[in-house]
Image (tube, rainbow, N blue to C red):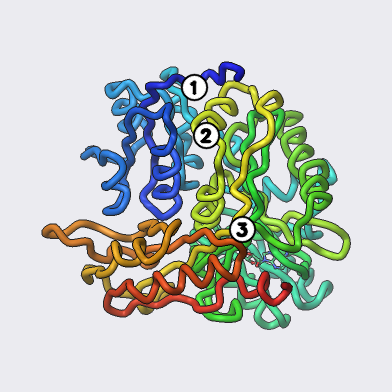
Amino acid sequence: MADTGAKSDMRVLVIGGGGREHALVQKLSESPKVDAIWCFPGNAGIAQKASIPNLASAEPNTLAEFASAKGINLTVVGPEDYLAAGIVDVFRARGLAIFGPTQKAAQIESSKVFAKELMKKYAIPTAAYEVFTDFPSAKAYIQHVGAPIVIKADGLAAGKGVVVAQDIDTALTAAEATLSGDEVGEAGRRIVVEEYLSGQEVSILAVCDGVSCIPLAPSQDHKAIGEGDKGLNTGGMGAYSPVPVINQAVERKIHDSILIPTLNALRQEGIQYTGVLYAGLMLTKDGPKVIEYNCRFGDPETQVVLPRLRTDLVELLVAANQGRLSSFGSLDWDPRASVCVIAASGGYPGAYTTGFPIDGLEAAVGALPDIYAFHAGTALRDGRIVTAGGRVVGISALGDDIQEARDKVYQAMERLRFQGMYYRRDIAWRALEKS
Ligand code: AMP
Ligand code: GLY
């Protein structure tokens, strides 16, 4: 086998503390090349697999000093806010290896206007749109185009910046509230008003080295709180992989007409994109179109994609950092399907109470083989694992097909308990409806 460049005594730092980071830590811990793992800020589940340092702050410089002191040779960043704040630039300036895009490259997620202008300039398929900073112009455009129509805040808004309006009044209210700063603050001072796309959504997480990329297995997430994908948007209530509507021809089309053109476009703009490029796509009757880019692994997509990955994740990430993806070869996937369902605190995504003891975590994982409990908002208090966030735990399972994986997750879920626990019972319904 070719020398992959990943040392066998790798010391790895993962940044973040949700289900995505727990899945990253789990997969990295399975690598024979990884010697030690730290995670900051982590959570109660991550603490069982990684050391959680006690740091004075979450500032990039503090994290970089820690990475230097511990001799860490690879840092992997989960959440977008660290990337948008320039953590990659700070680490690289100190000669520290870190997997993720620079602050400039992270604009692909942190500014929707940046992303849309890039796609327009380089003819990357996406919804038609206009950008507005004042309500009267936005109003005229919305009335001209008609509903359904989509209103998006330019900046990061923790999933709350998008309104898919089915009628003009809803669109006008959203545009006005967003522009006024009342809805999502400064992130909404510029808005994108865009064409409504219909079709199935799919998430493609592509590992990129600036020039080439290797897409991970496709997945689909469920953002809405309610069954049938109804109700308020959340950080994600569940996911599954693979996605039956995606075949190899569609995968190739996504690679050739979206992923590579995006990397080329960024290079033309002087940006070498290294890290995960997450393309949120709508499979329209005119082919796949970009709904949004994210500059990182998806959550909860990572919790279904990584359990299926057999290739050593650390080798893949090191190859990306060293610009060696074109010779990396193809990834080895577990042919089985995976499903993840999130158990959330009652009330989420609105107000909820935390601090409730969580029972049955071990019983849930032990219910059947190949089940994982990826912690999101959990903490250790007086020796007990308690709820500490809106999304609390994601149960993922592998099964021969999506139906079997889903049945396993729900069997495991029945063993999990905390006060007010809520989860959707219909995750992966689109895939099952299709088959
Ligand atoms: P985002 O936060 O950009 O992922 O948007 C949240 C959700 O809004 C997406 O997952 C889609 O379901 C929906 N959405 C965003 N843009 C569009 C669009 N142009 N047409 C239809 N639905 C959209
Ligand atoms: N699952 C959507 C996201 O990670 O943004």
Q: Which mark is residue 241?
A: 3
- Residue designated by label 2: 312
- Amino acid residing under circle 2: Asp
Residue sitting nearer the eye, 321 or 187: 321
- Amino acid residing under circle 3: Ser
329 w.r.t. 288: above or below: above
Tell me residue 93's x, y (percent).
45, 20
48 w.r.t. 213: above or below: below
Name the residue at 77% across, 70% down: 198
Q: Secondary structure at mark 2?
A: loop
* Quadrant of residue 101 within the rendered picture: top right
Whole-Å distance between the Cαs marked 2 and 1?
Answer: 10 Å
- Amino acid residing under circle 1: Ala
User: Quick check: can you spot residue 186?
Assistant: no
Whole-Å distance between the Cαs marked 3 and 2?
Answer: 19 Å
**Residue 137 vs residue 405: left or right?**
right
Q: Which mark is residue 6?
A: 1
Residue sitting nearer the eye, 214 or 146: 214
Classify the position of ligand 2 by quadrant: top left, top right, bottom left or bottom right. bottom right
Mark closer to the observer (2, 1): 2
Name the residue at 56% across, 31% down: 316
Most distant residue in the left direction? 382
Which quadrant, please, contains the C terminus? bottom right
Give the mark nearer the N terminus: 2 vs 1: 1
Tell me residue 182's x, y (percent).
49, 68
